Amino acid sequence: MSKVLSIGLVAVITLFSIFAMTSYRQANKGALLFGKYFEAAPMEGYGTQRSLASGQRDTDASILRQGIAYHQQEDFDLALVSFRAYLEGNPEPDNGQVFLLAATAAMASGNYAEGEEYLEQIAKDDPQYGAAASWHTALLELRKEHLEVAAAEFRLLEQSGMDRLYPVKAILENF
């Protein structure tokens, strides 16, 4: 009798565990997709970013170079501190790249709202950084479980041909 009771208890616990994992996956679908597809490193790499600091005061250029170096080393907390300091002295940089790096550093260090604020500074039609800003904005919407908003953003990326750079189709298959 005790053997039957033990087997029954194990079966109930197993079924309950399967149900709990399935429920978790459904309830946190966006957060799981965010975790799978978020990458802080820029798609185009860091090679061209050293030119961001040219033509600026030595102090600002040094702060920016340090932020980029921390970002490359995946020390996103220190990168974010550097980008904050840089943007405090240069609230309107020449292009959206600083905002993109600051946003990804903020997102990687768990400061999602701050990352979203930086992404909002990049124009959606920016030829160099608009698609990356849209991609990361859509990922943030996924993380917030705003699946319909994220799906709409991913569809816009797909329509603009950016699905060749980002795994948009793979994400849209989950909707």
Image (tube, helix red, strand yellow):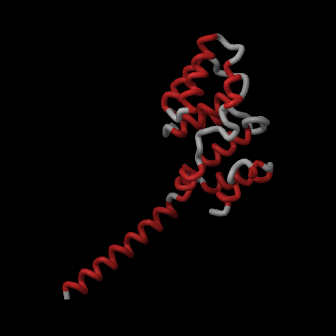
Quarter location, residue 62: top right
> Who's the residue at 69% across and 54% down the image?
168
**Residue found at the far front of this picture:** 47
Q: Residue at x 58, y 47 (%)?
A: 38
**Measured along the vertical axis of the image, is residue 25 above or below residue 5?**
above
Whether residue 141 is situated above or below residue 65 in the rendered picture:
below
Quadrant into which the N terminus falls = bottom left
- In the picture provided, is 168 more to the left or to the right than 112? right
Q: Position of residue 22 (x, y in %)?
A: 47, 68
For the C terminus, the quadrant is bottom right
Image location of residue 36, percent across then percent down: 56, 53
Q: Quadrant of residue 129?
A: top right
Give coordinates of residue 169: x percent, y percent: 70, 58
**Where's residue 158, x and y in %?**
76, 53
In this rendering, the answer to whether 169 lies above or below 42 is below
* Nearer to the camera, 56 or 116: 56
Name above or below for residue 89 compared with residue 155. Answer: above
Q: Residue at x 59, y 12 (%)?
A: 59
